[in-house]
Image (tube, grey):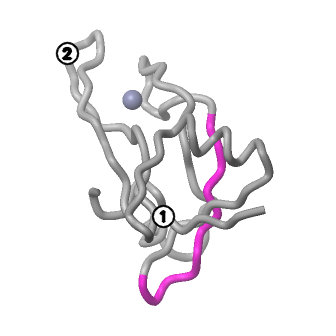
Amino acid sequence: MATYYVTKVRKQSVMNKDGNTHEHIIGVVTKLGAFYTNKEVVDSLDAGHEWYTEVEKEPKAKIKKKGYCPKSDCYHNPYLTTDPDHTTKNNLENLPRG
Ligand SMILES: [Zn+2]
């Protein structure tokens, strides 16, 4: 089994039916510079591989699958999240863009 370290996220801006826009994660970029879509990460998790965020001086946060984008009225899926811990700097949503 492989372990992947994610250093950047790719987000896309979308408009809801109510006209409000938000950004959601469409994929991640690993430390080695490879881009993976949410679906590819979920398939990899399902296959038993492990994914973590990597932020300098922060603990690594385990990436998990989540059904849908957390914004209401958005059905973008699958989605990715990280376990909350004592810091938010390693949250997937807070990684730099890549
Ligand atoms: Zn969304």
* Residue farthest bottom in this picture: 57
Q: Residue sitting at 48 percent across and 19 percent down?
A: 75
- From the top left corner, tell me how far across and down residue 83 is, in percent: 63, 60
Q: Quadrant of ligand 1?
A: top left
Q: Are marks 2 and 1 in contact (CB under 8 Å)?
A: no
Does residue 3 sit above or below 20 in this rendering? below
Disc 1 packing (10 Å; few <14; some 14–19; many ≥20): many
SS at circle 1: strand
Identified by mark 2, the residue type is Gly
Q: Please give the range of residues in magenta.
A: 56-66
Which numbered disc flags the more N-terminal residue, 2 or 1? Answer: 1
Residue 6 numbered mark, or none: 1
x%, y% of residue 18? 26, 12
**Mark count:** 2
In the image, residue 83 sits, relative to residue 58, either above or below, namely above
Residue 82 in magenta?
A: no
Q: CA distance from mark 2 to mark 1?
A: 32 Å
| Location of the N terminus (image quadrant) | bottom right
Closest to the observer: 8 or 68? 8
Secondary element at image label 2: loop
* Residue at screen point 67% across, 67% down: 3
Q: Is residue 77 left or right of residue 33?
A: right
* Residue 22, horizontal then vertical, whole percent: 27, 33
Q: Amino acid at mark 1?
A: Val
The residue labelled by disc 2 is 19
Q: Residues within 10 Å of mark 2 (few under 14, many from 20)?
A: few
